[in-house]
Amino acid sequence: MEALEVLFGTYWQPLYRYLRRSGHSEPDAQDLVQGFIAHLLGHNGLHLVDRTKGRFRAFLLGWQRKHRLKRGGFATHLSIDWKCAETGLGIDPIDPRSPDLLYDRDWALALLDKVLNDLEREEKDFDRWKPFLSLSAGYLSYVEIAVQFGLSEGAARVAVHRLRKLYRKRLRQEISRTLAGPEMIEDEMRALFAALSG
């Protein structure tokens, strides 16, 4: 149950933003998301989650389409930062992509944020090293990194390589938590990175 609460805590926002982009008002989208989560966590709705059927993100989207809830349908309300989820929705330029494609992008961003936040909490000096995750190897000057951090060039290479390896490992772990089996990880990684680039 705790693992599912963590999943919802991480991934409720893409579902909320999907609902808003699909034409739901703020209150209706809030009620739909809260009702969905409350139903699964508190009303034995977990039996609906069939891990043999694939991706958790697809399950969230499919369930929302199938179960159109009315406002106030559930008494339990969860503590969620709705204002944060609204950020940018009203001022986003018109995007020709469908709400489904934008949902996949938002899901991927939420996943990457979760991995980065977890690493930030767990790894000493992560803030100092974080910028090197996004730079391609061709742009890295290990000599400059070594000078900046008071290391040898070899130690700088090892430190960047270690952080990137840890990031990839954590990313795969987080993705695997949302899938039916490990054989789906590579496909899901490709799909999510395609959502970010598209």
Image (spheres, rainbow, N blue to C red):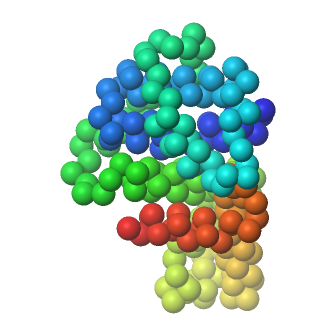
Image quadrant where one finds the N terminus: top right
Please report the residue visible at 70 percent of the width from the left and 20 percent of the height from the top: 42
Q: Quadrant of residue 162?
A: bottom right
Residue sitting nearer the eye, 126 or 75? 75
Q: Percent position (x, y) of residue 47?
A: 74, 33
Please report the residue visible at 56 percent of the width from the left and 71 percent of the height from the top: 190
Q: Percent position (x, y) of residue 171?
A: 67, 62
Q: Percent position (x, y) of residue 187?
A: 61, 70
Please report the residue visible at 45 percent of the width from the left and 27 percent of the height from the top: 68
Please report the residue visible at 39 percent of the width from the left and 36 percent of the height from the top: 19
Q: Is residue 115 left or right of residue 92?
A: right
Q: Percent position (x, y) of residue 64?
A: 49, 35
In the depicted structure, whether residue 12 falls above or below residue 127: above
Residue sitting nearer the eye, 60 or 144? 60
Q: Quadrant of residue 150?
A: bottom right
Q: Is residue 109 left or right of residue 17?
A: right
Residue sitting nearer the eye, 171 or 35? 35
Image quadrant where one finds the C terminus: bottom left
Q: Across the whole image, how many numbered discs are drawn on residues?
A: 0
Q: Does the image show residue 125? A: no
Residue sitting nearer the eye, 141 or 150? 141
In the depicted structure, whether residue 127 falls above or below residue 140: above
Q: Does the image show residue 129? A: yes
In the depicted structure, whether residue 165 falls above or below residue 90: below
In the depicted structure, whether residue 181 falls above or below residue 50: below
Extreme residue toward the left, this view: 94
